[in-house]
Amino acid sequence: MEQAPPPQRTAAATGSDADGESVRQDRSTAQNCAIVALLVLLVEITGLTYTMVTPALSEIAAAYRSPDISWIVTAVTLVGAIAFAVCGKLGDIYGKKAIALVCTAVFAVGTALCATAPVLPLLIAGRALQGFGLAVLSLAYGLVRDVLPKRLIPIALGFIGTGMGASAIIGPVISGLLVEPFTFRGIFWFQFGYAIVVGLLVWRFVPESGLRARAGVDWIGASLLGFGALAFLFGVGTIKSAGWLSVPVLGGIGAGVLLIAGWFRYERRAADPLVRIDLLAQRRVGLPLLANACVQFALVGNSMLVPMFVMSAPEGGFGFGATALEVAGFLAASGVSAMVAGPVSGLISRRFGPRAGMTFGASALVTGAALIAFVHDTATAVLLAQLVFGIGIGSASAALPNVLVHAVPADVQGVSGGMLNLVGSFGSSIGSQVLIVLLLLPGAHYTETGFVLAFLATAACGAIALTSALLVGPLRDRE
């Protein structure tokens, strides 16, 4: 089948040349550093959306008197997956800064809704709007490449990556400090103020990209995939309350499968598809994408389960009765080890190939998840498991993009990178639903058995990622 031509990049009305060099006007080092700093702060929206909220999940569940709070995470990742793909394309067409600010504004509206929501469905709707904030990451990367001097681009991208890792440490601490005096609503008011202030600074001081792409947006593909995933996850999420053979479960899962099958069929002939199905079918591409979905499944699972576990009252036979601030210590353990493991994984990939880094990361992920599933009687044991788990997440997350770089030709690396993020977001969405079902499987309330099942599910995902690494086969220019 003939492939659609790549989108054409043109100069914007601002008069930049075809390579966008005129927008890289002469600026002082201080001005360029300020641009990088503001983009790093803007991208923090993505990380804080998760890391500030997960320590408060138990309080949110208690406030709304519902143990099934999976959609608080699922709504963000599901909307974020579609927004990541669609808003990235809109940024190419209309300007990356403009679309990033629109996404920030939608995020702020959703955050205000979360802060004031009187009922759980409205909170979930607000979280869905927050999902647009996830698209800021890809738009910020594009701005860095378009407006900064070429010599500074690698440094700036490194700072953005480090900032994302730092949110895993800073977010839980801020959350713990706010929850005690202001309840969980204080978290969302902080995020609202943060988005407004940083958004205004970006609007004032960060230049717009001068590049534009003549390309369409795959609205039909995005709709089929989004509604298909929503229907499927709705079916999975109602298993506990409605029963395996109920109409909502079978109808939701069935409708989801049909819509996603229709999406596959449509993407094969779409002029500008969200996902290149021909690439997806290749083992060197499909297996790393599967591994990334599993890694993100495990990551979101750990960030949900650990706070809920350690905050559980020990009178129930498990947990430590930790406060929201004490939860930050457990999550920071995995965050710190993940930040350290990323560069280590890069060294392993450079020396032995990216598949070795992916294998190392997946192995550590399995070990850390299995440790916490079977040995969780003391805070020390849980902290050790978190350190090992963080090594796995950091190593695998750093290696997977390199695997794809070595798996595909240069002209489709941008497409494959977008597919990696899209599939990873859906892995997170599925994880948040499946793990809550497992958590509540033994009864109407959280039990130790439920936590063991859920942690074992994250270990199983690590095992699938490890198997994918072993089966991916030889990569281009390596091994």
Image: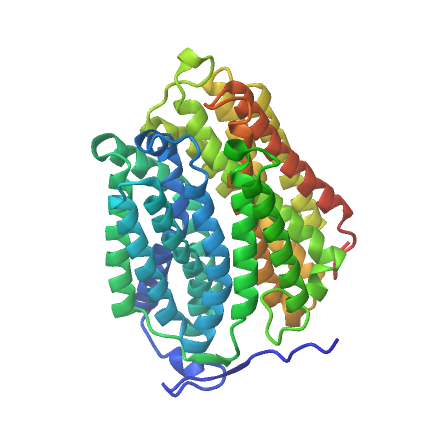
Q: How many marks?
A: 0
Image coordinates for residue 320, horizontal then vertical, percent: 41, 18
Colouring scheme, one of rainbow, by chain, secondary structure, one colour: rainbow
Say if residue 402 shows up in the picture. yes
**Could you say which quadrant of the image residue 13 lies in?**
bottom left
Residue in front for this viewpoint, 124 or 251: 251
- Please give left or right for residue 192 compared with residue 276 in the image: left
Residue found at the far front of this picture: 247
Q: Position of residue 52 (x, y in %)?
A: 35, 41
Residue drawn at x 59%, y 34% as measured from the top left = 458
Residue 375, picture quadrant:
top right
Picture coordinates of residue 275, whole percent (x, y): 62, 64
Nearer-the-camera pick, 142 or 87: 87
Image quadrant holding the C terminus, namely: bottom right
Depicted 412 relative to depicted 137: above or below: below
- Which residue is painted at 47% across and 23% down in the image? 446
- Would residue 395 be visible to someone looking at this image? no
**Residue 360, percent from left and from top:** 66, 40
Position of the N terminus, as image quadrant, is: bottom right
Q: Residue at x 62, y 49 (%)?
A: 254
Nearer to me, 384 or 274 = 274
Q: Is residue 354 above or below residue 460?
A: below
Q: Residue at x 65, y 34 (%)?
A: 460
Give the side of residue 431 with respect to residue 362, left or right.
Answer: left
Reply above or below: 476 against 190: below
Q: Is residue 216 above or below residue 333?
A: below
